[in-house]
Image (tube, grey):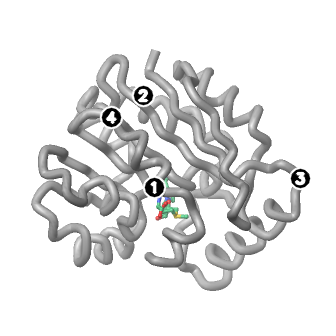
């Protein structure tokens, strides 16, 4: 978890959470959930991940906080169960694990989970053609295919920023902020803040 904190700007995501009902999609071990929950008892944070191993690990750490709920499920299942339930939906490094055809239903579900006017905070690595992108791609291939630490939902690959922007807009999000966060990291992070139009 320390390595994850050092290698990705998760504090930048946490700083952009709004409201008291928050959802972290693809929460993994729960590092971002911990950042959102620590010292913020007025918040309720739900973390979901399709990988039950990750949810199990997360439950044994941040899951002990009273304001945290961790569920092994897909975003579609949660959207059907809790439409318009969240003020902010956060997604950190998940889209690159989805096949291209699954992006639209994933983002549609993220929008359905937000109350009208709610906020999406999305972070991905972007394909900017740099050495960082090549390094990140091999690192993630190692994590998914060889070490099997990360559960893929059909892909491992990064796309140019324009494709991320187009996908968000197609799903009905109005992008409010785009921040390149590669500097100081060995991964070309890019962060979007968007509003459910
Ligand atoms: C690189 S990890 C990021 C974990 C966490 N968001 C973080 O920033 O520390 C990617 C996570 O996405 C999850 N994942 C894979 N496919 C997913 C899907 N279709 N929906 C939601 N999460 C998914 C994986 O199980 C894994 O926990």
Residue 93: assigned label: none
Of residues 122 and 144, the one drawn nearer to the viewer in this rendering: 122
Tag 4 or tag 1, which sits nearer the N-term? 1
- Front residue of 103/42: it is 42
Disc nearer the start of the sequence (3/4) = 4
**In this figure, which residue is indicated by the disc labeled 2?**
111
Residue visible at 61% across and 84% down in the picture: 147
Marks 3/4: CA distance? 33 Å
Which marked residue is nearer to the observer: mark 3 or mark 4?
4
Is 181 rendered above or below residue 120? below
Label 2 sits on a secondary structure element that is: helix
Q: Is residue 165 left or right of residue 39?
A: right
Helix, strand, or loop for circle 1?
Answer: helix
Q: Which badge, 4 or 2, is on the more N-terminal residue?
A: 4
Q: Earlier in the sequence, mark 1 or mark 3?
A: 1
Q: Mark 3 or mark 2, which is nearer to you?
A: 3
- Residue 37: percent from the left, percent from the top? 24, 56
Residue assigned mark 4:
18
Residue tagged 1: 11
2 shown above or below 116: below
In the picture as drawn, the residue positioned furthest to the bottom comes out as: 147
């Amino acid at each position: 978890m320390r390595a994850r904190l050092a290698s990705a700007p998760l504090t930048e995501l946490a700083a952009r959470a709004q409201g008291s009902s928050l959802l972290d999609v693809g929460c993994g071990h729960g590092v971002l959930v911990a950042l959102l929950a620590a010292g913020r008892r007025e918040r309720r944070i739900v973390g979901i991940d399709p990988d039950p191993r990750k949810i199990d690990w997360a439950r044994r750490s941040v899951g002990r906080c009273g304001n945290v709920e961790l569920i092994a499920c897909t975003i579609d299942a949660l959207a059907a169960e809790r439409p318009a339930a969240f003020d902010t939906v956060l997604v950190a490094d998940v889209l690159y694990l989805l096949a291209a055809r699954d992006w639209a239903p994933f983002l549609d579900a993220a929008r359905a989970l937000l109350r009208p006017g709610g906020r999406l905070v999305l972070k991905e690595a972007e394909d900017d053609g740099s050495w960082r992108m090549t390094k990140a791609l091999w690192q993630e291939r190692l994590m998914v295919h060889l070490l099997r630490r990360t559960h893929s939902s059909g892909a491992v690959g990064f796309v140019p920023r324009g494709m991320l922007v187009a996908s968000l807009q197609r799903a009905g999000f109005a992008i409010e902020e785009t921040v390149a966060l590669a500097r100081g990291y060995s991964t070309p992070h890019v962060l979007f803040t968007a509003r459910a139009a």
